[in-house]
Image: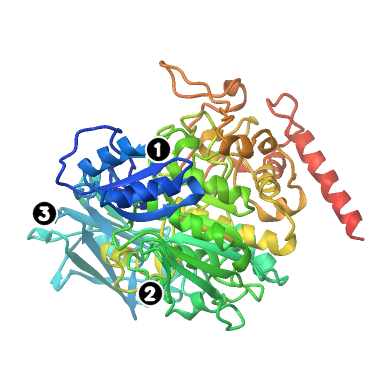
Amino acid sequence: MRRCFPRSSSKSLYVVVPLIASMSLGAFGETVDNSSDLLVMLQGSDLDSFIHSINEHGAVITHHLPIINAIGARMNAKQLAAIKRDTPNIERVIDDLAWEPEPEAPDLGLCPLRSSIELQWSDNTATWRLFNKSDEPLTIAQGSMAWPEELGELKSASWNSSSLNLAPANALDINDNPDKTRDVVWRHQQPLTIEGEQSARVNFRFASAPGNEAALQSQLTLQARVDEDCIAELVPSYSAPSQDTYYPTVSGAALLHSHGITGKGITVAVLDSGLWEANTELSLDTQGQERVIARYDAIAGAEVDSAFDESGHGTHMTSVLARSGQVTRPGTSLPSYRGIAPDVKLAVVKAFGESGKAGFLDIVRGVQWIVDNQERLNIRVLNLSFAARPRWPYWDDPVNQALMQAWRAGIFIAAAGGNEGPEPMTVGSPGNLPYLLTVGAVTDSWTEEDRNDDFVPDFSSRGPTPMGHIKPDLVAMGGHISGIMRPGSTLSEQLPEFRLQSGEFVMTGTSQATALVSGLVALMLQIEPDLGNDELKCMLVTSAEPAIEKDGRYAYSPFTQGKGMINIQRALTVGVKHCQQASLDIEADIANEQHFQGPAIFSEHTAPYLPGQSDVISERISEKGLSESRRWGVGAHLQRLTEEPSAEPTNWLEIYNAEQRRIKALATEDQ
C-alpha cells in the first residue's frame, strides 16, 4: 500500500511522525518588521542577566530552560536589538521562532484515491469504501475483483445504490475456473465519480457468507482504477485483528508476557500530543490499577490533571507501547497483551498540539521537566516519535542538547528515524543524535509467521547523518500497526480509511516502530533494572538480526537497516553490553570540548558510503515482499544453505558459533 506524506518545506516546526516535515529556522540577523512579535531563544551561561534585560526592555519571558542554558521570550525586533546590545553574555540567538508556515496541501503523489483498510461484511455482502483525498472529483474507469471458492457465485455488485456491470460473464460460473478462483471486471455505463474529499461504497453480494471475514480478506483481490497511474487496492489482513494486535508476538514481547515480564516497576515518559485517558486499556494496567502517574503540558509549562490529546498521535503511540487489553485470539499463549509493556507507569508530556506540530522550545521544556522529575517518578525510558530535518550539527541542536542531558542522567531514549526515505541522509532530528537509539521501520507484509516477506519499506528514513553517523541503529515493526485512537481526534478525522470496525486505527511509520522499541526496553529493564543506557543500546544493536542475501552479503546498507531487526530474546541472551558506543564521550560533547564524526564518507560524485561496503553489501535491490534470497538473522541464513559456506565476505558461521557458546555459558550460569 502506497503511503503519502507532506513534503518538507524550507521552514517548519517539529511534527509528529508520520506527518513529518522539516524544521528550518531563519538565519540570525535577518531583517524583521519591528512591529511584529518574535519568539526568540537566548542562550548563554548567565540566565539571570538575560531575565533582567528582557524584563527591563518590556519583552515577555515564555520559556525558562536551564537544561540548555537558555531563555525563550516574545519581543519585537527593536527590543531584541536593545537586549543584544545591553546583555554582553549572550552566546547565541535564534530569532524567528514565531514564524508559522503557510498550510501545505498534502502530497498525494500521482493518486489521491485511497482504499479502506478492511472490508465491512453484512452476512454475504461485502462493502468496500473508497476515499477521494483531493478536493477535485475523481472518476473511476473500472474495477476488478477476484475471490475464493468459499464465497461461491458473485450475485451482484453496486456502486453506492447503482448496479454495476460485471464482465466477463463466464467468470461468474464457478465451474469454469479450474483453480476455483473467481475473477471479474466491474464498471458502469455512467461515470463513477467521487466528489472531492468524499467517499463511495462498492457492494458485492455473494452466494455464501465467509467463515472468517478478516482471514478471507487476504484471499481477495480488489482494485479500483482511475488510470494507469492511479489505482487503489484492498490490502491483506491478519486473521483476527479484533482479537490481537500481532506485533507483541512478532517482536517477542508476547513470550515475555507469558513469563510475567510486562514492564512492571518501570516508568516511560511519552513526549507527544497527550493521551486519551478515557480508554481504560491506556489509563489502567493489567491489574486494573491507575498507571498514569504524571501529566505535564509543555505548551502551557505546567503539570495538569489531563493532557488531553487533540491530535490522536500520542494516544496511538502509547497504545503500541503500553496497551493493557488482553489478546483473545484462540491458540495464543496466555497471558498475552495488545501492547508491548502493558504494566509500565506512564508520564505523559504534551508538546504537540491539535495539528501535530510543536516548537522546539516546548519540546526542550518537556525534556527538562522529565529530567527534573526523573527520580520522583522513576522515569527510565523516553519515547520520541517525531522528527524534523536537521539544521545544525547534532551538538548545536537545542533539542539534542536537552536530550544529551537526559541521556547522561540515565534516561534511555528511543527516537524515530523519520518517514522521509528512501533517499540517503533523510534521518531526522533528534534521531541524528549519536547517543540515543534511532529506529527505522520494517513491515511483515501481514504475515506474522513468515519472516521471508519482511522488508524495509521505502518511507523509512535512511542515513547517514550529516556528521557521518550510521543511522538508524536498528529497525523494528512499523507497518500497519493497530492501536487505540480517540474518536474525533485530528488524525481520525483526516484518515478515516485506516479505521477498523473495532474502532482501532491502523497506522504505519517509524513512530510506531519507536513506540514498540520503547516498550521492549521497559521489559528489559524489568528483568535487569541496573542496566545503564549504553549497556541497553549495545545489547540491542549487537543482537539485532541483519537481512542477509544468499551470497552472504547484507541485503541492505547499514544506512537502511542499521544493525538489523530488533530481537528482544537475542538481546537478553547474546547481546553484548559494551560496543562502539563506548567511543563516544557525552561529557566532552556537553562541555563543547569534543564532538564526534561518524564513519560515513561523503563525495560530490556518489551517495555517502562506508569503507569497504562494496565487499559486504549486496548490489541487488531487495524485494518489497516475499524473497527467496533475503533472510533475517544469521541462523536463518545458515539454515537455508545446502553446504557449509566457504567464501562469504562475512564469516557468519563463526559469528553463529560464538553466539551459541554465549547461550551455552548463560545456561550454565543459571543452573
The residue at 61%/54% (across/down) is 411
Which three-letter amino acid code belongs to the residue tagged 2? Gly
Which residue carries the number 2 mark?
Answer: 503
Which residue carries the number 3 mark?
Answer: 136
Q: Earlier in the sequence, mark 2 or mark 3?
A: 3
- Marks 3,1: beta carbons within 8 A: no
Give whichever of 401, 115 is nearer the camera: 401
Is 655 located above or below residue 530 in the figure? above
Residue 185's x, y, as percent? 23, 57
Residue 174's x, y, as percent? 35, 66
The residue at 72%/24% (across/down) is 647
Which residue carries the number 1 mark?
Answer: 90
Horizontal relation, residue 428 to residue 592: left or right: left
Q: Residue 222: name its quadrant.
A: bottom left
Residue 325's x, y, as percent? 54, 77
| Residue at far bottom of view | 288
**Secondary-structure class at tag 3:** loop
Is 102 located above or below residue 355 in the figure? above
Which three-letter amino acid code belongs to the residue tagged 3? Glu
Q: Earlier in the sequence, mark 3 or mark 1?
A: 1
Measured Cα–Cα span from mark 2 to mark 3: 29 Å
**Secondary-structure class at tag 1:** loop
Camera-near label (3 vs 1) is: 1
- Marks 2,3: beta carbons within 8 A: no
Q: Residue 453, can we see it?
A: yes
Quadrant assignment for the C terminus = bottom right
| Residue at far top of view | 605
Horizontal relation, residue 103 to residue 258: left or right: left
Which three-letter amino acid code belongs to the residue tagged 1? Ile
